[in-house]
Amino acid sequence: MKILGIDDNPDINELLSVALNGNGHEFSSVQNGKEGIEKIRQTSYDVVLLDLAMPGFSGMDVIESLKHEGLMGKQKLVLFTASSITDEEIADLLEEGVTAFIKKPIDIEVLLEKIYALS
């Protein structure tokens, strides 16, 4: 699968790169939401892994931009965050087109299971 990671933490991007590329996926990453939107505009991804809590242009800003530009349903969107989010907020995001949600710290086995379930 072709997977994009959007996370401001370079350590998480490196972990995802090692885990996903090592399992046969084509993973690339960016460290902010605006770069993520540009990548999504330019390239078709099977899955986008999106951190919600990023400075400047958050994951929620990315979601709003994707909805506004009609790109929300073009790829599966998996959110992950260490910030607290309510079950109601998760349900709302799932209704808006988010595919799945994972809490940080990321368990690579859980992430891989979710990705395989999406294929």
Image (cartoon, rainbow, N blue to C red):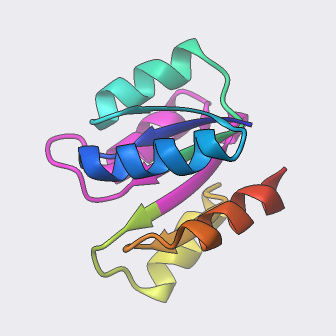
- The image quadrant that residue 105 belongs to is bottom left
Is residue 51 one of those drawn in magenta? yes
Rendering coords of residue 69 (x, y %): 53, 27
- For the image, the number of numbered tags is 0
Give me the residue at 23% from left, 41% from top.
Answer: 57
Q: Is residue 64 above or below residue 108?
A: above
Q: Is residue 34 above or below residue 81?
A: above
Rendering coords of residue 42 (x, y %): 55, 12
- Magenta region: which residues? 50-79
Give me the residue at 28% from left, 36% from top.
Answer: 31
Q: Nearer the viewer, residue 40 or 65?
A: 40
Rendering coords of residue 79 (x, y %): 49, 60
Give me the residue at 35% from left, 58% from top.
Answer: 52
Q: With 10 as the anchor, is 105 left or right in this view? A: right
- The image quadrant that residue 97 belongs to is bottom right
Q: With 58 as the anchor, is 40 left or right in this view? A: right
Give the farthest residue toward the top.
42
Rendering coords of residue 117 (x, y %): 81, 62
Q: Nearer the viewer, residue 85 or 106?
A: 106
Q: With 60 as the anchor, is 19 left or right in this view? A: right
Q: Nearer the viewer, residue 32 or 110?
A: 110
